Image: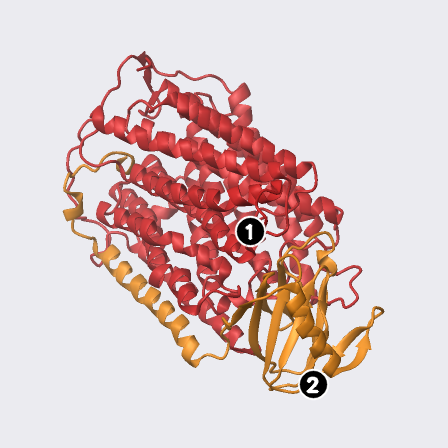
Amino acid sequence: MTTTTYRTCPRSGLQFESQAEKLMLANAVAAVVFLLIGGILAIGVVLTRWPAVHWLEADTFYQVLTAHGIDMLIFWIIFFEIAVLYFCSSTLLRCRLATPRWAWAAFALMMVGAVMNNWAVYDGGSSVMMTSYVPMMAAPSFYLGLILFAVGALIGCFVFLGTLVVAKRDKTYQGSVPLVTFGAITACIIAVFTIVSGAIILIPTYLMSLGIVKSVDPLIYRTIWWAFGHSSQQINVAAHISIWYAVAAIAFGAKPMSERVSRGAFLLYILFLQLASAHHLLADPGVSTAWKVVNTSYFMYFAVLASMIHGLTIPGAMEVAQRAKGYNKGLFEWLRKAPWGNPVFSGVFISIIGFGFLGGISGVMMGTEQLNMIIHNTIYVPGHFHATVVIGTTLSFMALTYFLIPVLFKREMIAPKAAQWQPYLFGFSMYGFVLVMMGAGTLGVSRRHWDMAFNGAALAYEWPGAAYLMMGLVGIFGIAAIAGGAIYIYVTVGSLLWGKPLDAGKPSKTFTPIPRTAPTVVAQSYGSAGFAAPGTFVLAMVFLVSFILYYFINWKYLSQVWGLS
Amino acid sequence: MSAILPPAERLWWKHPLDRVEGTWILLALIWCLTMFAMMVGWHIYGKQNLSTETYKTTPEKFTAKAQAFVDKYTVRTETADKTPVVAPPPGSDIYMVARLWSFWPILELEKDKTYRLHLTSMDYNHGFSLQPANINIQIVPGYEHVVTVTPNKAGTYSVVCNEYCGINHHSMVGRIYVK
């Protein structure tokens, strides 16, 4: 066994093992680099879709859009998630990381794969979009890059699982793993399923690009590819919800309202969340109605139920903690007196609200088999997933980074004022961005489309003026959000490079196990009407009513289109 | 900081629920089941359900059928490349070919009449996005999808390709007239 050291961070009390710490740092930095690349590419995307600007040529636009999608949805997020997995195992369980050499090999593979894939796209000839639907073919290195990246990420998942075993064997904790680690295990299980699906379909496609396999069936490709493409976004859901719980604990000292409910909800994710890949096949030929109905509803919406539970229990836990501190007046004093100036909290709260109201409601609407026909492949779809993946996942990761700068990077944050404003600028401009995209999508505007004026088409279609207006707003909100992203990168990279070094805490040769915490009483003596978190319950009811209204408005809309059977 | 610490109570699964959680779970569950019932119920009572009738096909086979259809029912041609405008009788099988970068032919349908629309792609994936009605269907090469359509409003409709299919994707627009 390699020798290693442990340090206890004097600011947070968290214990970091030196190998795990270096790996978290490397993965997090790689993630931020890809966020930077993806962010620069985003400028090209939004300035081209803004009809009045229409900046890039068609071939450059599709190339930039392909790279933007892959860099953001795959490389930025999964590099960061590997860092989160190591944090949730080695740091939260206070143990050494299993097989650090394998973890470095995983990192190297992911890096080589990501660079190779990016290279293939910039080289031209691989502008096939993130989905790379066959029979449209990219260069072999496009697929090989993704496969290497996936293998690396899979090794990272097994290092995480191995670390759980190490913690159990070394008895670094007693009883059950923390809720946040439990959420990370959920993310890891989903990740393994995802990556294996990716391999099943990308390996034959790679062989096809080399000419070894003659053809891959386009419908089978779509079916299995989405078990990779959609599921990779479900890793994010499990990961960023774990981060929400972690931040509630860090910023408020909040304990979960009930471990049973929160863990049960994660369990529902493991069982049902994956079925959502079906959302992408609802408008496809050759898939039966029963298959669509069962899968698109996550088997009777049990995964939606789980998300609705997390959406209540996380703010609920914050409310209970705040009320215990005496912020007990009325329904919302706990929320008014929350630390709005702390970007760790504000980022997560803006993320929770945006993910639920914008990403969640739109996702369920478009995932309804029949309703899907009124938005399939329109710009509504990227509107939805920018609400989940950018407002949900990316903003949560940003908020967590602000916590990690002093704790993991051991640096004083440069420009704390800029960091304080960043979640508001980025979060609210993304709120606007996704709303106008969904608006344009409701009018039918296509996604992945260079020119809504159909220049050169013999039978052009004239979009309504409102569609042009909303696509213009997509450009304006998009640029504002990119500016918010730039501030995040400036603060993070700047702190890492020029921030004042902080005390790391004394290294020790052995770990300090997690002490037993004293059992607490559950009965709450605050709140009202027997509700421990009445304010959160009111917010939840506002959410439910908006959900119901929006859902039925879309049925009304569907009922007016052509009859189809 | 207990979400990031092991649960204090070893038997955490025996903890009672708070009323706020119990109530919310019940409401959320009812809503989830309502949505599920809605989706199933629309298959019985709704008028917009996507057909699942699908056949394996090849570009040659499909082109032959589409050509016979065009030869039989063409009433005039439009645009510079003389795209046929085809007016089939109500209730018949009608064909639309998606290929790089056009939809062929132009269809002329009657309001409130039903047709069996056959869709396939000759090459890559394409998208059938009927505007301004806003109905969107995926077109996958190798598969012939038969969708029963009943136009409910007269007018000129465009079919916009909304699945990325290469450099001239933006110029791929077809047309359907409804009288």
A563 sits left or right of A185 in the view: right
Q: Residue A368: which quarter of the image?
A: bottom left
Density class for disc 1 (Cα within 10 Å; few <14, some 14-19, many ≥20) is some
How far across and down, in percent of the image, does residue A523 sit? 16, 48
Of residue A251 and residue A338, the one placed in the foreground of this image is: A251
How far across and down, in percent of the image, does residue A551 sit? 45, 67
Determine which residue is flagged by label 1.
Answer: A216
Q: Chain B is drawn in which colour?
A: orange
Q: Colour of chain A?
A: red
Would you say residue A425 is visible in this rendering? no
Would you say residue A330 is visible in this rendering? yes
B67 in relation to A436, above or below: below
Look at discs 1 and 2 and give the one toward the viewer: 1
Of residue A528 and residue A310, the one placed in the foreground of this image is: A310
Determine which residue is flagged by label 2.
Answer: B179
Q: What residue type is labelled 1?
A: Val
Q: Which residue is drawn at 25% across and 50% down?
A: A261
Of residue A242 and residue A139, the one placed in the foreground of this image is: A139
Q: Classify mark 2: helix, strand or loop.
A: loop
A266 in relation to B171, above or below: above
Q: Residue A242: which quarter of the image?
A: top left
Quarter containing the N terminus of chain A: top left
